[in-house]
Structures are given as C-alpha cells and as structure tokens.
C-alpha cells in the first residue's frame, strides 16, 4: 500500500482542527479539543511525584532537534499538572517553577559561549540570549501575580547583571515588567519597547522607543568595548488594537533572532502577513521565537524562514485554564513543519551553531 506523506497527514490534521467539534462536557473550550482535558484538582502526591519525574526526565534528556520521545512524555505530564485550574496557587507548582528559573539564572552566570549562541527559555515568552560578545533578553517577567508564584526579586537582579540589553514586545504584564525594566535601566542597560509603553511614567523617559518599520535598521550600543546590536522593530499587533513589536536582533557575530511577542494580526489585505512574508527574504534568520498560539504559525515560519524554531508562551499561568496554551497544542500546530523546532520547558536552554 502506498505510504501517506507527512504533508498529507498534516493537511488532514489542520483541516480537522479548523472544523469546530461538537461541544463535549469535558471540554472547557473548543480550542482544546485535541488535548487532554484539564482537572479542577488532583492529589498532592500525584502532583509531587509527577513534577519530580518530569524534572528528572528533562534534566536527563536535553533539548535537541532530534527529540527523544520521553521528553515529549514529560512535557505532556507538565501540561496535565499546569492545567489543573488551581495550579498557579499550588505550593508544589510554585516551588517547581521557581527552582527551574533560579537554576537557569545560575547557569547563565556560569556559562560562556565560545561560538554560536545559547538561548534560555524563562517564563512565558521570556528569553535570554548569549553569544561570545553579547547577551540580551526578551520579555523578562518574574512570573504571574498569583501570591507565592513569582521568583524572588534578587534572582531578577542577577539576571539583569548578566544582560547587556532587553527588548519588550508589548504592554501586557506577562511580557513587560516595570520592576524588571527598572533593574536594567538602573544598571545603564538599554531597554527597547513599543511606542506608548507606560506613557507618562518616569520609567518611560529612560527607555528606547524605535520607529516601527520593516525597513528601518536601528543600532543599540551596549556597555564596554564598542559593541552594538542591530535591530528592526517590525509593526506587529495582537489582534487589531494592541501594538506588539516583532523584534529582529542581529549580534556582532552576525547571528539573527526574531521574537514575535503576541503577534497575531488578522489575515486579509493589509494584514501583518504582508510584511511577515518578506522577513526571510530580506534577512537570514537563525532562530524564530514565536508565541505558540499565533495566527497560523506555519505561515509565520514560511515568512521568516528560520533555521530553527523555539516556541514560547506555553502554560502562561496568569491565563484562565482554557487559555493556558499547552505543549501538546504546540506539537499539533507544528506537526509536519519543514522547519526544525524544539519545544522547551521553563529554564531549559539550547546551544545553536550554524
């Protein structure tokens, strides 16, 4: 019998996903039809043992383009835990999150990159990027506002010590933190954000607000040695009204990263897809850091044409449970993609070389 190609399977899966299924009693939302339903609660013993197991698996099987199957099993178990409605308030979940971020910051402090770049995935869509000559961050926040969840401010201070600059995509609290921004600015580390962010507040007067244009290349000088980052602030949006800068950043080594923030502009004439389609034509992009739920992630990938995709925004614990985008959905969205991709948990990192 003739084999069915991956592309055919992917097309069939996409078509099925676009057809609204009948509402089931176990579904909180049609958007979660292809993932296991969430629980209202679960035994503490199951949560504790599951978090320990998932943590050990992720430590033993590092992120890689050729993924070991047990990594996916661990991430799916995390989905199950993080989709308990009360998960953000559970001390076991809070301890797990904080420990992973604290471990990542300690790793950043001790890691030097002789070639290529290492990228750490922090909370939500926050990233830390390090090359031989420069370090920079995107959308760093300490965590959700649920009491007890966020990491200690001293951990964020240590992270600010390590970075040369930060880019903030847009106004939402799961992407931009005034507290963290002030830490960077107090260290004379530049912070680049979208026009109007925290308008009228003292902190805004110390930030950099670049022109949003796909044709304007900006330079950002960082402390020491005449180093600078080149970047473009593409005019992205979340929906129709919220501006969300899509930052393309190129290091002194010529490595380029694109982070999308909550880019999800509508389709149709004059939509953001018009300029997205030209990003990869105009620039060689090494890493694309998209929000996993963006409008047509595969179309975004074709426009940016990256060497590798690292997804973000899974399991934002400040969202209601039906909008905590899970790792399982990310795998579903990117099934059959011609671009290599890696799905990572909080605190994990990947070393990229061309």
Image (cartoon, rainbow, N blue to C red):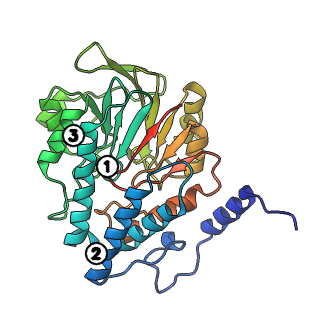
Foreground: 194 or 257? 257
Give the residue pinned by disc 1: 122
Q: Which residue does the image show at 19% across and 71% down from the upper left? A: 91
Q: Is residue 192 visible?
A: no
Task: Please tell me whether residue 69 is drawn above or below residue 182 in the rendered image.
Answer: below
Numbered tag placed on residue 105 in the rendering: none
Numbered tag placed on residue 48 in the rendering: 2
Foreground: 200 or 30? 30
**How many numbered badges does the structure rendering display?**
3
Q: Determine the residue located farthest toward the bottom in the rendered image.
A: 25
Left or right of residue 176: residue 7: right
Q: Position of residue 127 (x, y in %)?
A: 34, 43
The answer to the question of whether label 3 and label 2 lie on touching residues, with beta carbons closer than 8 A, is no
Left or right of residue 202: residue 48: right
Q: Which residue does the image show at 47% across and 61% down from the upper left? A: 71
The answer to the question of whether label 3 and label 1 lie on touching residues, with beta carbons closer than 8 A, is no
Lower sequence index among marks 3 and 2: 2
Q: Which residue does the image show at 59% across and 38% down from the upper left? A: 303
Q: Determine the residue located farthest toward the right in the rendered image.
A: 1
Calculate the distance from the C-alpha at mark 3 to the C-alpha at mark 2: 28 Å
Numbered tag placed on residue 159 in the rendering: 3
Task: Please tell me whether residue 110 is drawn above or below residue 221 in the rendered image.
Answer: below
Image quadrant occupied by the C terminus: top right
Q: Secondary structure at mark 1?
A: loop
Q: Position of residue 174 (x, y in %)?
A: 28, 52
């Amino acid at each position: 019998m003739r084999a069915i190609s991956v592309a055919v399977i992917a097309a069939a899966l996409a078509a099925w996903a676009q057809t609204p299924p009948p509402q089931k009693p176990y579904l909180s939302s049609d958007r979660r039809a292809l993932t296991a339903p969430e629980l209202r609660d679960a035994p503490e013993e199951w949560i504790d043992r599951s978090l320990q197991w998932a943590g050990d698996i992720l430590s033993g099987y590092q992120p890689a383009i050729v993924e070991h199957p047990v990594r996916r099993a661990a991430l799916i178990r995390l989905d199950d835990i993080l989709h308990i409605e009360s998960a953000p308030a559970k001390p076991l979940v809070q301890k797990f999150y904080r420990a992973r971020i604290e471990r990542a910051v300690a790793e950043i402090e001790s890691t030097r990159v002789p070639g290529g770049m290492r990228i750490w995935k922090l909370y939500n869509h926050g990233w830390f990027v390090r090359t031989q000559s420069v370090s920079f961050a995107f959308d760093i926040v300490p965590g959700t506002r649920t009491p007890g969840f966020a990491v200690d401010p001293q951990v964020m201070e240590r992270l600010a010590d390590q970075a040369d600059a930060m880019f903030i995509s847009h106004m939402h609290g799961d992407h931009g933190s005034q507290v963290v921004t002030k830490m960077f600015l107090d260290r004379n580390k530049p912070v680049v954000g979208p026009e109007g962010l925290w308008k009228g507040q003292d902190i805004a007067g110390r930030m950099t607000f670049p022109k949003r244009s796909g044709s304007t290349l900006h330079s950002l000088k960082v402390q020491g040695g005449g180093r600078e980052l080149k970047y473009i602030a593409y005019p992205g949006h979340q929906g129709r009204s919220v501006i969300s800068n899509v930052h393309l950043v190129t290091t002194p080594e010529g490595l380029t990263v694109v982070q999308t923030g909550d880019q999800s502009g509508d389709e149709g004439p004059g939509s953001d897809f018009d300029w997205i389609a030209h990003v990869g034509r105009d620039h060689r992009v090494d890493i694309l850091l998209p929000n996993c739920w963006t409008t047509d992630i595969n179309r975004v990938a074709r426009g940016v044409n990256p060497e590798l995709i690292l997804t973000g925004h899974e399991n934002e614990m400040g969202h209601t449970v039906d909008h905590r985008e899970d790792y399982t959905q990310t795998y579903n969205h990117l099934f059959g993609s011609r671009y290599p991709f890696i799905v990572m948990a909080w605190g994990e990192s990947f070393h990229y070389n061309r």
